[in-house]
Amino acid sequence: QVQLVESGGGLVQPGGSLRLSCAASGFILSRSTGGWYRQVPGKERELVADITSGGITNYADFVKGRFTISRDNAKNTVFLQMNNLKPEDTAVYYCNAKKPYYSYWGQGTQVTVSS
């Protein structure tokens, strides 16, 4: 059974950090492009960062220099290290794994940045 399970979300003050994890089961995550997306009510889901099977990373302009995506192939897990968080980073963060013929989503984890 294919599954992506996110963890690590929560409430953090502006300037703080969080590390999101996405554990995959039922398929080999490293053979996919693994990504993190986020969504706020009333807006479309947007790409935050992704990492290809070859290890090439890509970031949205609004997180460059603050967020880092990485992957642990032995744990079949992709991470998102988020530093210097801002209130506008508040959203539900979703993990995604995709190839041309499939796209899997996690259930999402809430990140709230507030003082």
Image (spheres, rainbow, N blue to C red):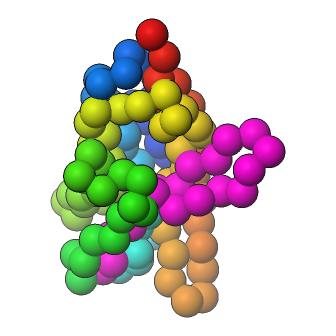
Question: What are the residue bounds of the magenta stretch?
Answer: 36-53
- When the figure is inspected, residue 40 is found, relative to residue 100, above or below; the finding is above
Which residue is located at x 53 percent, y 44 percent?
93
Q: Nearer the viewer, residue 111 or 85?
A: 85
Horizontal arrangement in the rendering, residue 38 relative to residue 83 (left or right): right
Q: In this rendering, does residue 53 appear at all?
A: yes
- Residue 54 inside the magenta-drawn segment: no
The N terminus: image quadrant:
bottom right
Horizontal arrangement in the rendering, residue 22 relative to residue 67 (left or right): right
Horizontal arrangement in the rendering, residue 90 relative to residue 64 (left or right): right
- Residue 44 inside the magenta-drawn segment: yes
- When the figure is inspected, residue 22 is found, relative to residue 52, above or below; the finding is above
- When the figure is inspected, residue 87 is found, relative to residue 77, above or below; the finding is above
Which residue is located at x 53 percent, y 55 percent?
37
Which percent across, then down, holds residue 86?
41, 31
Horizontal arrangement in the rendering, residue 63 relative to residue 101 (left or right): left
